[in-house]
Image (spheres, rainbow, N blue to C red):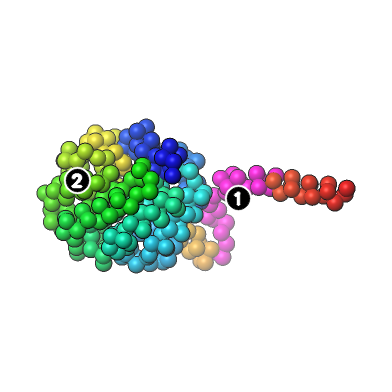
Amino acid sequence: MTSQTSAGRRLRDALAIERPLQVVGAINAYAAMLAERVGYRSIYLSGAGVANASFGLPDLGITSLDDVLEDVRRITAASSLPLLVDIDTGWGGAFNIARSIKEMTRAGAAAVHIEDQVAQKRCGHRPNKAIVPTTEMMDRIKAAVDAKIDADFIVMARTDALAVEGFDAVLDRVSAFVEAGADAIFAEAMTDLDMYAKVVKAVNAPVLANITEFGQTPLFTTQELGSVGIAMALYPLSAFRAMNLAALNVYKTIRTEGTQKNVVSTMQTRMDLYDFLGYHDYERKLDELFKNEESREAN
């Protein structure tokens, strides 16, 4: 793979241009297209998003590598934006983790984050999480880094230690993770800016802040995050949550009122949909093809 054109290289370039880099969640190909049109430089596929949206399951590590890869391929086929992918704990031991890295790269992902929860993981902002020993997580990271087929591919290490062992454990772990070869750090569920500042100071690697709604982390602005050196601001499911509420409102309205008249204003128009999809370009191509075919038949 040529590093100059790889997804990993594009993500590294985006990090050099925008600080903190806004990484916005896209649960499917069309959402990725919307994000690209708006001007984002990178997108994200959440494990919770795959489980919730594609399978109707909770975020409890139920989905498989192949389940996530299917969504990755659809998204990278539709958008040129570099994609960060949540691979939970890597779906097994060292060989499984290595396969995950190779397959994610082949599917067009730019980066993954792998976490230090036990295999029976929980949502990062829920109670009763359990984490593996630091040495075991370091082995996961080494297996991931050793499996790279693109030197620019980013292996990000996530720690959920704050809720389990406290903040000192977070600092110890992120330092060990970078030592093991992690390209970037994801300190989950931090509760104030000073924590982020200390994580940034502890490691010589880009640090991501997960700015998810309804969780443990306040909704810090990019200016606030930038002031403490955060390199990436993640919004994993913001659009998905908005889509769900809008869809639920439409369903309820049609059911109770017998018409969608009063919610049409909340919908994307047909012409806007066509615009984002480039629909008319496809139509013009069809017209051209059929015109050529008619000309051949006439001759």
Describe the element under mark 2 as helix, strand or loop.
helix
Residue 92 location (% of width, % of height): 29, 64
The answer, for residue 44, to whether it is visible in the render is: no
Pointers 2 and 1 in contact (C-beta within 8 Å): no
Does residue 101 lie above or below 197 as drawn? Answer: below
Image quadrant where residue 214 sits: bottom left
Task: State which mark lies toward you, 2 or 1.
Answer: 2
How many residues crowd around disc 1 within 10 Å: few (fewer than 14), some, or many (20 or more)? few
In the drawing, what numbered circle is on residue 270?
Answer: 1
| Residue lying at 32% horizontally and 62% vertically, measured from the top left | 96
| Residue lying at 26% horizontally and 42% vertically, measured from the top left | 207
Question: In the rendered image, which residue does mark 2 sit on?
Answer: 179
Please state which amino acid type lies under the numbered disc 1.
Arg
Image quadrant where residue 71 sits: bottom left
Viewer-proximal residue among 63 and 249: 63
State which region is magenta.
257-284
Viewer-proximal residue among 59 and 78: 78
Image quadrant where residue 227 sits: top left
Please state which amino acid type lies under the numbered disc 2.
Glu
Direction left: furthest residue = 168
| Residue lying at 29% horizontally and 49% vertically, measured from the top left | 145
The answer, for residue 135, to whether it is visible in the render is: yes
Does residue 127 lie above or below 295 as drawn? Answer: below
2 or 1: tag closer to the N-terminus: 2
How many residues crowd around disc 2 within 10 Å: few (fewer than 14), some, or many (20 or more)? some
